Amino acid sequence: MEVASSMSMVMAVLTDPICLLWTFVGTFMGLVFGSLPGLTATMGVALLVPLTFAFPTVHALGMMLGTYVGGIAGGAVAAVLLNIPGTPSSVVTTIDGYPMAQQGRAAKALGWAATASFFGGIISWLVLATVAPQVARVALSFGPPEYAALALFGLMIISSVSGKSLLKGIISGLIGVWLSLFGVDPIMGDLRFTFGNVNLMSGIAIMPALIGFYAFPQILRGLSEEQSTEMKTARLNLSDFIPSLLEIWRSKLNILRSSVIGTFIGMVPATGGNIAAFLAYDQAKRFSKTPEEYGKGTHEGVIASEAANNGVTGGALVPLLTLGIPGDSVTAVLLGGLMLHGLQPGPQLFSKSPDIIMGIFTTLLVANVFMYLIQLVGIKFFVRVLKIPNYYLAPMLVILSVVGSYALRNSLFDVWITVLLGLMGYIMLRGGFPMAPTVLGLVLGPMLESEIRRSLILSAGDWSIFFVRPISVLFIGLSLVIALTVAVKSFKKGQKTDEVEASI
Amino acid sequence: MKARAAEYWVIGILTVGAIFFINQAQNVSSATLPGGIGPRTFPLIIFWAILILTACLVGAIIWEKVKEKKVVSIEVESHTNLIWRIIPYIPRQTLIVIAMCLLLVFLWQYLGFIIVAFLFVAGASLFLAPAEKRSIPRSLVLAALFAVVIYALFVYVFKIPLS
Amino acid sequence: MLKNRLNKLVLLLVLAAVLIASTTVFGAWEPRREITIIIPWSPGGATDIMARKLQPIIKREFGVNTIVLNKEGGSSAVGLTELITSRPDGYTVALASSTILSLMGQNQISWGSDRFTNLCLVSEDPMLLAVNKDAKWKNLDEFLADVKANPGKITIGTSASRNVNHADAVLAAQSVGSSIRQVPFNGGSRVIAAVLGGHVDALVLKPSETISQIQAGELRPLGIYRKERLASLPEVPTFQELGYDVFPYGPVDQISYLVAPAGLKKDVKDKLVEIFRGAMLSEEFQEFSKQAGFVCNPIYGNEFDKYIENLTNALAEVAQKVY
């Protein structure tokens, strides 16, 4: 593609006010969707597919991409302010974001979240816009054994996000896996534990579980506590919440590493923002000089999570645009949207419709800029949520959560699931069981199971398939190293202090 | 000791649940493709793991108790009724809000979203607000506004039907 | 006094009967409010896109408003259970597919086809066997000869299990008296990625899922599970013309079709068929079907009932003998 002609296509988008307007509206809508618990980026894009049907293609794409970027970034708002992840990919943001808010640094946490999201988006955009065709093949090297090893590696992260007690963390993780076991078996198609209920055939979806485990316990706990998150919200200056260039420079490695992890996970089909955020958080903690700060409100945790989940946006578009294979659930919907506009995403899109490709690149960049700007203006208003008295906020949050879980599949069954899991989550929270491992188990448990079984079908029952492939060996090796270090550490700790409470 | 009581509850639920599901797993087919693992194996591993780890947790708690007994001679709470140690201390208002939530979902299908949301927000906010800050007109207006705005947002803007 | 009342009652009853009869016999039914189309799959999926594409056409050509309601879950069982329990008044229809017939064949759901009023066929998506562009098999004969020579060695990726994909993969091997190793994936895009990455030898998917990779030359299509060749992929031969019988139990087609709850009145049914067929036969929708790679030949009436009956039987037989 000639540079001159592609530049003119970029200019065509940038000078088209209506296109910019729709991208702005899309980004705004995405932020709203992302920050409301229960409404996700996937849903926002799916709703836009028919709405933008009559638009010119690039306008429609701009709006959908804006919703994608905004939806993933917006999840951080509820995660920080309320400890309720707005989208599945912002679960990790709660781990450090909420403690920051409790310490009166909510605006700062949101500023970091927005900044990290922006960097994640831009770095993944760079990868997409420059080397997409070259790196797309990397994603294809992931076969079932590699997925299985990745899932195993991911489950090791439980050790990083368990908080005080590793034992409780593992149990929480297993509860998540348990919840993922209902419904049609991923390999054979047999029914498991459906008890004759049609609604259970597709299992327990992640969103109702997430709302149940995060939103309800949080709301219920909030009732019995006086507002602990109250903070001074008067007269926030930009410098109070936007990290300075110096601060950004100090975290450059974390930002870069997390964004790259996000981009890479985005490129691997059928993974997504939450896995990326967990991996990035784990890596940030391991590389950190002060790992003990993680979980207690360090901005580095927020950076890792948000840079990674927005890194997914550009990454997930790589296989979609180059191979016609969506990288995550949102891009799967985008694929449908492109087809409705008469486009076949895939290798031919670059040669056949360079204007569309340039349109996608440009609007994606613009959407990231809009996302940052809207958040910078918005943070002042977001933090006012904390000023709403709890006796108004809690009932409203209940309604929002319930509506969110209903709207996912238009199903009251999901609402019941949400409420029941909410009660379970409340008891777990009271008993000191961490929630993040549950989400990890819910996401990675089924992946581990189905990929192991799939690999064994491929190898006709030969387990060596996991040990002859380099990527798979790498992940299995890393998992072993983590398991060993954790074991040694807890053994030492047990010897040194002889304090059982620390390990319970 | 409320945290401890909640722990007992989780342990209880997990133990009963895992045993029930291990039993239920017998109904799951174990047929498989050549070389593969059947649909029954993985769930069984998970349930047994839950059972074993829960037992470990019980062990750890007992171990801690034994140690505590050595250090502090008499436990204060040992005099209180066993039931009160197992029932987690849940504040009365939390219990009532839980009941309201269940009622909310139950009534939804009969009354429709707007009415249910209005009743819930109005009722819950009046119930939860401290007496000196309670204001009936304010709660009613806020609840009505909230229900209508959310309904309009979902149905007309997002095009998600709410029954 | 009592008699008087009874008389009035009889009079009323007669009047009501006449009214009801006249509407069914003389007055054709017209939709007076919007029609809800239940899509038992997630928004953004192939079925959903079809419905969304039909919406504006129906509005333009017939002035009828439609609402698309996504009720996903249970491999379409959740949404279709909702349909059969709704009132047969013509204001609720759904897009069902071979999947639900397949579930019925395996007794995974507790109700059967008799709870539907079949309206018309929407799309026919014949399956396609394809391999990586670098694969050693240049055509179907070479591939099946290899399958015959190495029973149980060659892997074929399908999306999920116990559906038309699975059946067709197995039936291809059975047509040469051999077997393959079926590798079920969660969704078509994972299957394509696995074949492009060289993890799996071949795939059986719908042309609508693979057309972009085929056009780009990344995948090599070997054969189509259909009686005639496809208009969108005219160079790909069918199994039948090369002499492989892949349909020993009757044609196992991947279709989606429009249904209403059982007990729909004749005039309502006719009107709905008229509206939806009209929209599907429009130039715009036909153009869309070609581009997306599915066949839109909306047969209806007795012909269609017969078609569904055959398909149901074939799927039930496949469920017993293949899975």
Image (spheres, coloured by chain):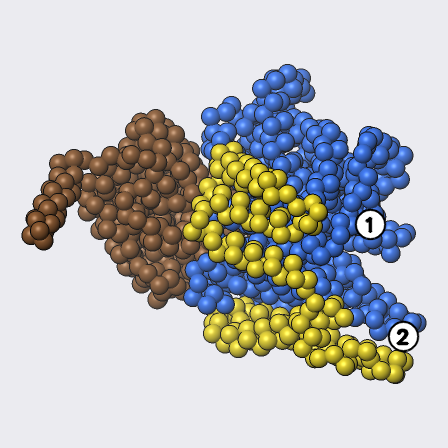
Chain colours: A blue, B yellow, C brown
Name the residue rendered at 57%, 70% in the picture: B43
Which element carries disc 2, helix, strand or loop? loop
Viewer-proximal residue among C122 and B136: B136
Name the residue rendered at 53%, 71% in the picture: B40
Label 2 chain ID: A
- Packing grade of label 2 (10 A; few <14, some 14-19, many >=20) is few
Label 1 chain ID: A
Residue that carries the numbered disc 2 in the rendered image: A498
Residue that carries the numbered disc 1 in the rendered image: A297
What x and y, as percent, mark residue C296? 33, 38
- Outermost residue, front direction? C1
Say if B120 sits above or below C55 in the image.
below
Left or right position of C118 against A268: left
Q: What type is the residue that disc 1 sits on?
A: Gly
Name the residue rendered at 44%, 63% in the picture: A197
Say if A4 sits above or below C47 in the image.
above
What x and y, as percent, mark residue A27? 63, 31
Query: Mark 1 and mark 2, same subunit?
Result: yes
Name the residue rendered at 55%, 75% in the picture: B20
Question: Would residue A129 be seen by someone viewing this image from the given angle?
Answer: yes
Which image quadrant: the N terminus of chain A? top right
Left or right position of C152 against B58: left
Which element carries disc 1, helix, strand or loop? loop
- Packing grade of label 1 (10 A; few <14, some 14-19, many >=20) is many
Say if A115 sits above or below B123 in the image.
above
Q: What type is the residue that disc 2 sits on?
A: Asp
What x and y, as percent, mark residue A470? 71, 56
Counting residues from the start of the chain, the first of labels 1 and 2 encountered is: 1
Q: CA distance from mark 1 to mark 2?
A: 28 Å
